[in-house]
Image (cartoon, grey):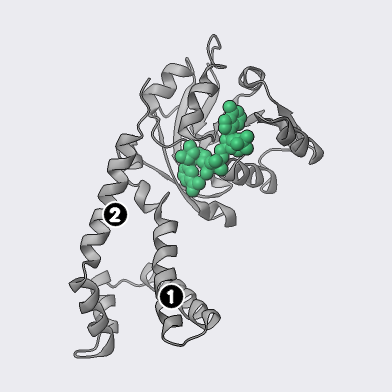
Amino acid sequence: MIGIVGLGKIGNYVLSGIIDKNLYSKDDVLLGLRRIEAKKEYEEKGYLTTLDLNTLFLKCNVIVLSVKPQNYDTIISYSRNIDFKNKCIISTIAGIDLETIQGDFKNGSIYRVMPNIGAALGKSVTTLCYTEKDELFETAKKVFETIGSVVEVNEYTLDKSVPLNGSMPAFIYMFIKDFIDVSVKNGLDYETSKNLILDTIVSSVEYYKESDKKINDLIIDVCSKGGITIAGLNEMYKNGFDDSIRACYQACLKRSDELKYKK
Ligand SMILES: NC(=O)c1ccc[n+]([C@@H]2O[C@H](COP(=O)([O-])OP(=O)(O)OC[C@H]3O[C@@H](n4cnc5c(N)ncnc54)[C@H](OP(=O)(O)O)[C@@H]3O)[C@@H](O)[C@H]2O)c1
């Protein structure tokens, strides 16, 4: 039986993934909730639920933790005195490392994952790391493959790549939003601007993925000498585009360090 603790955005994506892809049936899923209204809501949808995480930890052999870091302490108050041998704990929680989780889920097989909201379309790019690659590795991987692709990394890479997968959708949306805003200010209508930008981003990404060309060559291909695009690019860089990206990446890592869980 699989237990999901925390049915927010990520918890719900995982729930939809494992049910829609037939990895688990509803009878084999137990949802760990903290509000009676949420319990009723999920029961009406035919799910087994509990407000007692102790029960969930005892019953389930696969446990997904998808609460916010600030709720971790409450969760682990239910994990004491349980032997998690042969149980797989998969944490989506940012900032709580494998060693800490291992200490709180004694003898469990511990996995950390970093999904992203591509999960809404079954297209999350999820990084996954572990304390030890044991027989429960495939189980952990399969759960997150129901919401997209899984990339095996070490813990250092998982932490340092959060800006590239977990946070990236927000950066992309901001880039799109700023281009829509400026084109609307210049007289284009919103829908036309949005469609042009979105379709162009999709085809640019697809071409980069399929092409053998280096990214610099792809940029050069669009920039004729003395042309329109190069004029735009030059302004981007004069106004600190690359500095802004570097600062953004470093700010994510700094904040991630600040948020690191301390007992
Ligand atoms: N969102 C993303 O794009 C993203 C990407 C990668 C990783 N993450 C990580 O994934 C985790 C979940 O993120 P999220 O965006 O899904 O958060 P969220 O939407 O805020 O959901 C968190 C859920 O945890 C529940 N919860 C809190 N304490 C609980 C408890 N004691 N027992 C049972 N449930 C409890 C909350 O319940 P209530 O409904 O009762 O408040 C809420 O539904 C976070 O640690 C985050 O760092 C998120």
Residue at x-position 35% and y-position 50%: 163
Q: Residue 61: x and y, percent?
A: 60, 24
Any part of residue 214 in sight: no
Label located before the other in sequence (1 or 2):
1
Query: Does residue 150 appear left or right of residue 99 in this picture?
Result: right
Query: Does residue 219 appear left or right of residue 105 in this picture?
Result: left
Gap in angstroms between the C-alphas marked 1 and 2: 21 Å
Nearer to us in this view, 35 or 51: 35
Q: Residue 140: x and y, percent?
A: 52, 35
Q: Which quarter shows the N terminus?
A: top right
Q: In this view, does 116 lie above or below 84?
A: below
Q: In this view, does 117 lie above or below 199?
A: above
What amino acid is at disc 2? Cys
Label 2 belongs to which residue?
248
Q: Residue furthest top?
A: 81
Label 2 residue SS: helix
Label 1 belongs to which residue?
181
Residue at x-position 48% and y-position 74%: 198
Q: Residue furthest front?
A: 185
Residue at x-position 52% and y-position 27%: 89
Nearer to us in this view, 263 or 55: 263
Q: Which one is in front in this view, the residue at disc 1 or the one at disc 2?
A: 1
Q: Which quarter shows the C terminus?
A: top left
Nearer to us in this view, 147 or 250: 250
Q: Tag 2: Cα neighbours inside 10 Å, few (<14), some, or many (≥20)? A: some
Label 1 residue SS: helix
